[in-house]
Image (cartoon, coloured by chain):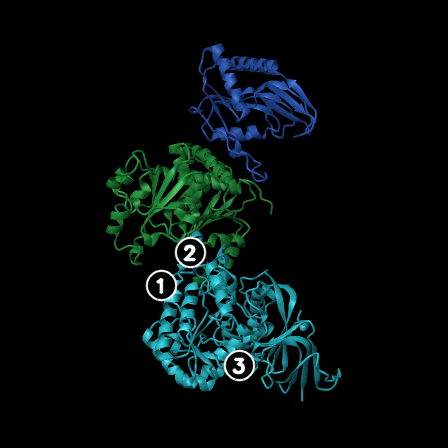
Chain colours: A blue, B cyan, C green
Amino acid sequence: MKTNVVMDEKAIERALSRIAHEIIERNRGGERLVILGIPTRGYELARRLKKIIDEIEGTDIPVGAVDATLYRDDLAIKKTQPTLKKMDIPISIDDRKIILVDDVLFTGRTIRAGMNALMDFGRPLSIQLAVLVDRGHRELPIKADYVGKNIPTSVKEGVKVRIKETDGVNEVLVESAPR
Amino acid sequence: MQRLVIKGGRVVDPASGIDALCNIYIMGGRIASVKAAKDDETELIPGAPGLEIIDAAGLVVMPGLVDLHTHLREPGFEYKETIQTGAEAAAAGGFTTILCMANTRPVNDNQSVTSYIVNKAKGALVNVLPVGAVTVGLKGERLTEAAELKDAGCVALSDDGMPIVKSGLMRRALEYSKALDLTIISHAEDMELAGKGVMNEGAVSTRLGLKGIPNAAEEAVIARDIRLAELTKGRLHIAHVSTRGSVELIRSAKKAGVTVTAEATPHHLTLTDEAAAGYDTNAKMNPPLRAKVDVDCLRQALKDGTIDVVATDHAPQSVMEKDVEFDRAANGIVGLETAFSLVYGLVEEGVLTFNELVKVMSLNPSKVMSLDKGTLRVGASADIAIADLDAEWTVDPSTLKSKSKNTPYAGKAMKGKIVKTIVGGKIVFDCLKEA
Amino acid sequence: MKTKRKDLLGIENLTVDEIELLLSTAESFKEVSAREIKKVPTLRGKTVINLFYEPSTRTRTSFEIAAKRMSADAVNISIASSSAVKGETLKDTARNLEAMKPDAIVIRHSSAGTPEMLSRYVGCSVINAGDGAHEHPSQALLDLLTVKERLGRIEGVRLAIVGDIAHSRVARSNIYGFTKLGASVTVAGPPTMMPPGIERLGCRAAANMTDAIKDADVIMMLRIQLERQDEAFFPSAREYSRLYGLDADKLRTAKKDVIILHPGPVNRGVEISPDVADGPYSLILDQVTNGVAVRMAIFYLLLGASRET
């Protein structure tokens, strides 16, 4: 199996920093923002984004986790159930601008599930999507508002995001054969 | 006159002390002669009119098995078994004479029911001998007219399925039947102590969360009955002994000269209460399957003669009684067609000799009930079972002759198989003609 | 959990990993019950039949809520008598239910082993909601979850179970559950209610209640069926209470921070005195809350994925 590093630590940092700036710019500051990541890596990226924005704006933006597992559309066809992860919505999301964060945007199904989950918690003012990698092959009409890097792939390839908090290293890999 | 010759088989007949290769000549339904094969120079012309030759080389020839304990369910429960199907099952199992218990509907507690059974039995493949009830309706209140029952054909008396609770009544029954030379077969169970128990009381019942029946529920009544037999000098036979304590009671009673005999079933000799794990209702019976220590004791008792007889307690039950909750399921298993192979398993294990097998399954039951059966002596009725001890087979309930299929032995690999059964000189079962 | 498992019949045959997965999944589900909209679409389109041959408002409601919070359709069938009484075999009943195409049957029955028998007759999942004196796995799981939440662990915990051990499915399931996860379990009760060979399930049998509770971190009081009095298991509720009821006096002989569980419903003043039942150490209501989460986890792990048939 061939693996290519397509983003290294520096590239990831730059991408997150840019996304943070874009979020601030588009939302005219940190007002009413809530950053929610999809566990496991999306949540860690959400925390990083919060830190960067807080440093720039001097805010303390609420950050949390949205576990989309219970809202997935593939539970009935999977052979083993995915392990449930953390659901952590720190404050009421009514009339808040939600930044939903995930590591890789692929078919769009996880994001759909994540948005459905969010809707059960209230009625946000808006939901914006930030991803570190957009690898294409969407199966649903979903588009990211903030993208760290577009990486065109074939369906057979695998995209792997590894970050310090969970994997001990910051990098994005493309694997020529699926895992 | 019809002649039948069984040639070259290993003849095992404990009554006459024979265990040798012999030819058996049968005429008019009786044993005409038994000659050692090597000395026999009788010339037999195959195909001669009226002559039938069975080649028994490599097979064992023994007196037909005698079962003191079956439930044929007729009259009243013909959906479980009939006298005819029960007798077919018996024939397939090598049994040539079977006793059927009185807990039919109506109960066999009067001459007309006995006559009905005797009449039905005339068309059956094997000798079916009824056991009359000790008390009217098995209610344990009033003695039946035992003399009339005997005249009609009953060979013993029993309320089997129900114990006789009243000690005074049991005493009178033992006394009264003495004059008629009838044995009382005791179903020994303290029902109040057994309570709502559905299996053996012990670690397994605790694990399964099922209510247990303690050994004492059987032993307490056996102890009473032995004392009563001693008091009355009546003839007492203990049905389906299942515990080590019962064995000890019977052993010491025999030593003391009390006229008591006892039987054990093939299942109590081969299965423990672990068979109930998984809630297999075919492992539910009364008395329940006991612990290994009890099984070991029963085997020892069978070997040393404390237990005289193996009896099947053949108890057919339909799916209506068995495919229900364990607590609600009826007791009992079919046993006629697996008994020989199960007991032969004890021979293979070295518990019994083959000669002892024939004793406990044919000679002793005949003696206990004073039946003119259980031997291949000249002049005896030609009731014979022929077995292939090397044949291996697997129990498949769907192929059982019995109308009911409730056996815990489904799928069990067996060794030793009945290949032919002969009653009164007539072949009533031939495994070659099956399937 | 290995989804190879079709049924949840008892704790006895679960592996440690399976129990731990059930508990951690249940922990996740607690959050759902804390939401304003207490419903997730996970089991949309699945049908759960609650088949109760024995009245039990609490357990049935808990299973029903759990199913509904996961968007499954829950149908309750209460049957007063057994199949046999109706002239139907259990197999007939099973086949009839199966024809309605449920995804799971939750069964409560007074006769031990009935869930296991049912599971042999149907292709859908069978969940044991208590069978006779055999097992009550969801109860043990919620007890484990409750203790784990309060003490932070199960390993090394000392559990005392007091009361009618012989007739208790709760005791059996908890003995298996707690010992599998490394706790030590002591049981105590009137000798008439101590079944033979109970130690073989992995617990210690104490001579009396004081001995059982003196070192316990957790005391589980079992419900006493007052009808047992008529069966001579104990002479009177009064004497039972004096010897095996948990009151303030007996509680003083236990550890100061001991916690108290009861599967409910409580016979106040018999197995547990009112002040103790409502006292600070009692987690009886936490048990009820955790019951829903545990049952959601059971549904999720048994029904959440496809099964090879």
Disc nearer the start of the sequence (2/1)? 1
Disc nearer the start of the sequence (3/2)? 3
Mark 2 sits on what residue?
B202
Q: Amino acid at mark 3?
A: Lys
**Callout 1: helix, strand or loop?**
helix
Disc nearer the start of the sequence (3/1)? 3
Q: Residues within 10 Å of mark 2 (few under 14, many from 20)?
A: many
Mark 2 or mark 1, whichever is nearer to me? 2
Q: Amino acid at mark 2?
A: Gly
Q: CA distance from mark 3 to mark 2?
A: 43 Å
Position of residue B389 measured from the top left corner of the image (x, y, whole percent)? 64, 68
- For the residue pair B390 and C37, the one nearer the viewer reads as B390
Marks 1 and 3: in contact by CB < 8 Å? no
Mark 1 sits on what residue?
B193
Q: Amino acid at mark 1?
A: Leu
Q: Is residue B320 visible?
A: no
Mark 3 sits on what residue?
B120
Position of residue C39 measured from the top left corner of the image (x, y, whole percent)? 46, 36
B214 relative to C105 in the view: left or right: left
**Callout 3: helix, strand or loop?**
helix
Chain letter, disc 1 residue:
B
**Callout 2: helix, strand or loop?**
loop
In which image quadrant can residue B185 be found? bottom left
Q: Is residue B305 above or below residue B212?
A: below
Marks 2 and 3: in contact by CB < 8 Å? no
Q: CA distance from mark 3 to mark 1?
A: 38 Å
Q: CA distance from mark 2 to mark 1?
A: 15 Å
In which image quadrant can residue B348 be found? bottom right
